[in-house]
Amino acid sequence: MPAMRSVIPIAAALLLAAAPCRAQYGQGIAGSTWEGVWGVGSQPACLTLNADRAEIALVRAGVDLDNSFLFLGREQLGLFGFGRRIRVDTTAIELGDLTTDRERAVSLDLRVMGPSFSLRIGERQAIAFTNSVRASLTALDLNDLARKFGIDTIALNPGEARRVDEATVRSSAMSWTEHGLTYGRLFPLGGRRQLHTGITAKYLLGIFGLYADNRAPLLSALNDSVQTVTEVSMRYGLVQLTEAPWAGGSGGWVHGHGWGLDAGAVYAVLRRPGGQDAGAPGHHALRIGAAVTDIGRIRFNRKAASHAIANGSTTVSALEGLDIGGMNEVDTALSSLLLGDPQASRTGRAFTQMLPTAVHLSVDYSPIKHLALRMEAVRGTTAPIDGPSVRDQLSLTLRFETRNFCAALPVSADAFGNWGIGLMLRAAGFMIGTDRIGGLFGLNDLRGADLYFGAKVRLKGRKRPAGD
């Protein structure tokens, strides 16, 4: 009975090469009065909630790992680990319930806001200019690959055949910079009611793009010495990065262009009729918010190509002998191997990827001054492969806040009922937090881990109520 190595999909290797991604949320700081320019990415209307005249953001950065398909206990993997060695017991992998209608995935997210600023214009308007570097990765259909994790052989008798479900994978990855202009407007509705609105227009510069959709091929044992891989079906697009992107000048790293749009509104009920202090902590009794973020796309048209392979075939020995010197050789090598022509798989010299669009709904209730309880639901709407997708999330955050100090305890859950608890602390213009502190330090099951921090300078604060 011949033994053959598992066919590890090329797409999986490609998605691992694009690992850095975007921090989608920071629920500990989200919705706070003094979040200010840090929050325009998730709620553009936050500009007029902020009571300061101006802010200069030095940095707002974060990284987020989300893992909804694979269980790794704390004894198996500790991200920091306090001296524990990192190891994975592949014989004890537990996949859990895979019958849900939501797609399980592994995603990595990164967002770094660079020098940015916001400015209030009078009492009812505000603007902000923001600059960020972002990236996002989503990988799906990994269940069968996980089941064979740690197993390097597939055994077939001569004349047998089976689908290699372990090779099935879908993934999408992007990295880009964005440069945005945000406009916020406050509309008094009479008495204690207000409507805060905001909209952001963003110009995008694409750095890297990748999508891959690989379906299960058919593995056949013709005899003791010949095994074939047939019915190979995949489509993918890839930006070919040069060894030194800066060699082409300041624009050498730019491989595409695009646009983006964020929009949101917050309905606020104040404790007393609004005045100069309407935005100060403790002055609102209720806020109800809604926002749509990252509507847009990037067209990669420089050093980019899209490919499709239908009914490709090869032998296992040829596949094992495939030698790819780098990512720039992936397209021609696969096309030669599976279609017999290095250019046969190419379908275009450009491709488009959508931004990770999300819908945000929130309720922020303040029963007493400085103390608030916030609930937020986030739902991603971008279809897999069209672009990286946002993880769905429901969070409940208890927050104590003054102008110079804030402490928050966010509790969050994903679409599969995986819960996490975090902690956020802010002192003046410095902030650090995590929404899933257990995963970060290996204290509980690694369903996800994140860390975010920020620093900004606040200028010309407005008058606050006595005692704030």
Image (cartoon, rainbow, N blue to C red):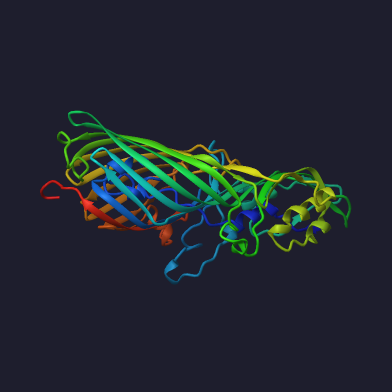
Judging depth in this view, the residue of 90 and 380 nearest the camera is: 380
Residue 401 located left or right of residue 465: right
* Residue 326 lies in quadrant: bottom right
Quarter of the N terminus within the rendering: bottom right
Residue 53 x, y percent position in the rendering: 25, 48
Residue 50 located left or right of residue 105: left
Judging depth in this view, the residue of 140 and 404 nearest the camera is: 404
Decide: is 161 above or below 7.
above
Q: Disc count in the image?
A: 0
Decide: is 87 above or below 12.
below
Residue 360 appears in the picture as rendered? no
Residue 409 located left or right of residue 342: left
Q: Residue at x 61, y 54 (%)?
A: 15
Q: Residue at x 16, y 38 (%)?
A: 275
Residue 274 x, y percent position in the rendering: 17, 36
Q: Residue furthest bottom?
A: 83
Residue 18 x, y percent position in the rendering: 59, 56
Judging depth in this view, the residue of 68 and 199 nearest the camera is: 199
Residue 126 appears in the picture as rendered? yes
Residue 321 located left or right of residue 459: right
Judging depth in this view, the residue of 447 and 115 nearest the camera is: 115
Residue 428 x, y percent position in the rendering: 25, 57
Q: Residue furthest left?
A: 466
